[in-house]
């Protein structure tokens, strides 16, 4: 991302702008040093009651951030917004991850471990997750993974979810980059063997399974836990069994 930050001392007042990285910070033993989180930082349970909520991932409350006087802010290129990050960077060291693959996620863990002086924990976590995903997947079939409805938005290439889909044996039929919109006619034409409806950011429910089943009679339609596919922090250590059994 062509950004460099300087951190002269071990950070003591950290703000996390990304839910999956918030959970990682806690799992690395940094709960006490974490002073601000977003409203979407739901893990670990109860954390939001202890910390200042600085807004959403794409809507920062700059006055609340200033009041916290952070000495490190941690974000992500995809989940946060450029204008907000640039504004924060004028006053604070803002470290950003940029994640497309599992390898990127593991590298992020190691780097956060380095800048927060928790390298041993980060290395152990990264090694465990790397080992968990070191298997030859059973081929499951072609798939389309949806993250939104009205409009229908699917997961394409050059995304972390696409990498995870491939690692567990799915063939992602969406060749376009990032998160393209689809019409129901396009979805019917693709005729995937699997249609995976994520629990986030859109909360797909059984009624949506029934709606899509009316149009896709030959497709296996499943509700899936979006955290297991898209959270690229320490939640990955819980993902293997779930992903293999879909």
Image (cartoon, rainbow, N blue to C red):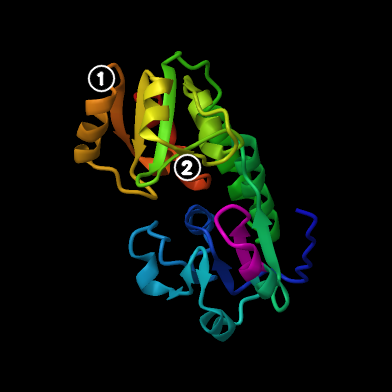
What crowding class fits label 2: few (fewer than 14 Cα within 10 Å), some (14-19), or many (20 or more)? some
Left or right: where 118 falls relative to 4: left
Tell me where residue 3 sits by quadrant: bottom right
Looking at the image, can residue 241 be seen?
A: no
Q: Decide: marks 1, 2 in contact (CB < 8 A)?
A: no
Q: Is residue 8 magenta?
A: no
Identity of the residue drawn at 67% across and 43% down:
107
Identity of the residue drawn at 60% across and 48% down:
122
In this orientation, which residue lies closer to the viewer: 49 or 64? 64
Looking at the image, can residue 106 be seen?
A: yes
Q: Residue furthest front?
A: 185
Tell me where residue 228 sits by quadrant: top left
Label disc, if present, on residue 190 of the rendered structure = none
Q: Is residue 84 magenta?
A: yes
Residue named by callout 2: 230
Q: Percent from the top left, x then y, of residue 246?
A: 34, 25
Q: Percent from the top left, x then y, of residue 114?
A: 70, 55
In this orientation, which residue lies closer to the viewer: 122 or 20? 20
Q: Is residue 44 above or below residue 90?
A: above
Q: Can you tell which of label 1 and label 2 is closer to the viewer?
A: 1
| Magenta segment boundaries in residue numbering | 73-85
Residue named by callout 1: 217
């Amino acid at each position: 991302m062509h950004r460099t930050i300087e951190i002269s001392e071990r950070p003591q007042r950290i703000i996390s702008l990304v839910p999956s990285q918030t959970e990682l910070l806690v799992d690395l033993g940094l709960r006490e040093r974490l002073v601000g989180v977003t409203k979407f930082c739901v893990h670990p349970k109860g954390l939001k009651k202890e910390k200042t909520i600085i807004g959403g991932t794409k809507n920062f409350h700059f006055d609340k951030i200033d009041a916290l006087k952070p000495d490190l802010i941690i974000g992500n290129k995809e989940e946060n917004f450029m204008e907000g990050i640039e504004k924060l960077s004028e006053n604070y060291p803002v470290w950003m991850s940029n994640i497309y693959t599992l390898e990127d996620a593991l590298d992020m863990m190691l780097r956060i471990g380095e800048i927060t002086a928790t390298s041993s924990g980060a290395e152990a976590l990264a090694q465990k997750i790397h080992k968990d995903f070191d298997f030859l997947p059973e081929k499951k079939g072609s798939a389309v993974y949806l993250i939104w409805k009205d409009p229908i938005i699917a997961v394409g290439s050059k995304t972390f979810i696409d990498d995870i889909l491939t690692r567990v044996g799915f063939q992602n039929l969406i060749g376009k980059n990032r998160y393209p919109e689809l019409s129901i006619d396009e979805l019917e034409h693709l005729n995937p063997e699997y249609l995976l409806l994520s629990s986030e950011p859109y909360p797909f429910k059984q009624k949506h399974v029934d709606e899509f089943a009316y149009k896709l009679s030959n497709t296996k339609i499943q509700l899936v836990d979006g955290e297991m596919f898209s959270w690229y922090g320490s939640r990955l250590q819980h993902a293997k069994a779930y992903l293999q059994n879909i």
